[in-house]
Image (spheres, rainbow, N blue to C red):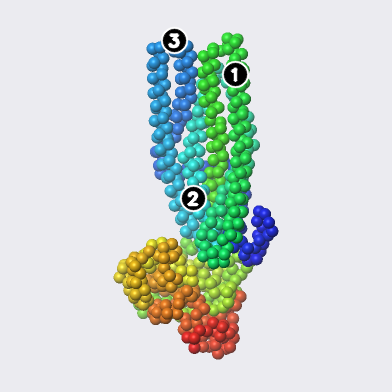
Amino acid sequence: MSAMDPIRTPSGPPRTPRDLGLVRLRRDEEENEARTRPLDWGILQRLFSYTRPIAAKRNALVALTLVRSGQLPALAWMVGAIISGPISGHDTSTLTWAVLGYLALAISTDFLFHFRQRFAQELGESVVNRLRGEIFAAVQRQPMAFFHRVKTGSIIGRMTSDVQTLRTGIQDVFFVSIVQLGQMTCAALLMAWTDWVMFLIIAGLAPVLWGLNHHFRGKLSRDSRATQESFSRVTASLAESVGGIRVTQGFVRERHNAGLFRELVADHASYNMALARTSAVLQPLLELNSQFFISCLLLLGGWRAFDGAMEVADLIQFFFLANVFFAPIQTLGNQFNQALIAMAGAERVFRLIDRKPEWSDPPDATPLAEPNDAESAGVTVEFDRVHFGYTADKPVLHDITFAATAGQSIALVGHTGSGKSSILNLVTKFYPPTSGTIRLDGRDLSGIDSDSLHRRMGMVTQHNFLFSGTIRDNIRRGRPDADDAAVRATIDQLGCADLFDALPRGLDTDVGERGSGLSLGQRQLVCIARAMIANPRLIVLDEATSSIDAVTESRLQHALRVLLAGRTSFIVAHRLSTIREADLVLVLDQGRIIERGTHHELVQQAGTYAELYRQFSSPDAT
């Protein structure tokens, strides 16, 4: 989809992504799949496999659930037996013992209910913890292309709302349904033993209930899944709006974005209402059937009592059991609805967990070799007829060929969209080339272990992202085992120790969310220090000084020269003070290298680079 392709919203004329601003209505590839997902035994088996670490508690919970499912009908049967026995016979001594027995059974029922609730919550929490750990691990192993396609809100939705529906399915739906079904089964057996003719009326309810459930199951499944997906879009919109609040307020887009967000909320509400309407039809029908069959029981039971085929006391006991039998019907309808929601959530969660990375290191990949003391700390980099595209039908790099010896600095110059960032993505192995070969130290990059490469790589980008914590913590992200002395040496080398020491708590100053507690220049200095402390062999500077004022930049130049000395670096910058000192400048246009050479060579050629130089040259450029 191009930048100006129209997107149709639920109402109104087509809008382009530019009109949509920060709120994007385009669904990711996972949300475009079929919505129907009935109950699936394979998914249920996999879901309950997560209970194996606490199998003893799970088995105890199943046993408690089965016992409780028999206790409830037993209570109803005892009430009928007490009425038809001691009360009808005016036997006060037996009545006292019978009531005490009833109370004992009731107390034991509540006692078991306490442990059933407790074990069920512990079981649900255990499953949720494992699932969230696997989701996080699955997301972490995905390549960069995954994060460019899948919205952040969708990932958050898997971790939050979808996992929460699974918690409900594990600790509530499953065990509550066992209790309700067991209660109906035990009540049915007791009714058949009491009067099999009357029980035939009850048995006639089964096919009716099955037909209702079968009819509404598909619609409930579709509506519940649509509700979950629409909620993911609301979450994605909220995450983007909060993350881009500076842009929103800077361009006075609050009202416009609020309107777009209301459309998403309205869309989500419409799915919720459709789900509620379907449930509102199913549950009253189930209850109406219950009342209808009770009416039939009253009529048949009355005639049988008149004819003497059934005692009135037995009829009373039968009705107690019938109430126990019919009571779970509405509950089971609610649980079935929750089960469909949990099934949709489970499918989405497992799809993310099972998602294979589009590419990964081959099994025989080996680490990037460390240089000998006599060798340069840098790496040699060769691009040999490299082609690349983020999608197969839209190539962005064409026949890129160049070589950088160890310790050289390579500057990439060109207009926006010329392919500079794509080359950085390839040399850092965030993406594989479509065709051609990239070599580091003479080895095919695909055969080098990605982790070892990234550990020996320093990166400073225009988007100076900082993690929550202190300045010291963020600098140590480049080398977690670095001690305080190493951190201090790094900022001294940068020549910015006085800037950090002047803060209220020095290096222990909290950076705030995404570095909001620091100035733009301070954030960039922390990112540069984070790259320096890693002692990298390969350095990537992507507009690294674009947010630094002239005074701050001048303090960085000496430290950057020390950092780049002997190390291979790729530099994208509009400021010519860095590009001018590069060993090789590659001028890109529409994904092709159109000029190459040193700064002075390209200026003398009076070509594209010379024109760019005249446009962007600053007073310090010579």
Q: Secondary structure at mark 2?
A: helix
In the image, residue 167 above or below residue 298: below
Residue nearest the viewer, comparing 181 with 239: 239
The amino acid marked with disc number 2 is Thr
Residue for point 51% across, 14% down: 313
* Residue with the mark numbered 1: 298
What residue is at 50 percent from the left and 25 percent from the top? Answer: 186
Mark 2 sits on what residue?
160
Distance between mark 3 and mark 1 Cα atoms: 26 Å
- Amino acid, disc 3: His
Extreme residue toward the right, this view: 13
Mark 2 or mark 1: name the one nearer the start of the chain.
2
The N terminus lies in quadrant: bottom right
Residue kind at label 1, given as amino acid type: Leu
Label 3 belongs to which residue?
Answer: 90
Q: Earlier in the sequence, mark 3 or mark 2?
A: 3
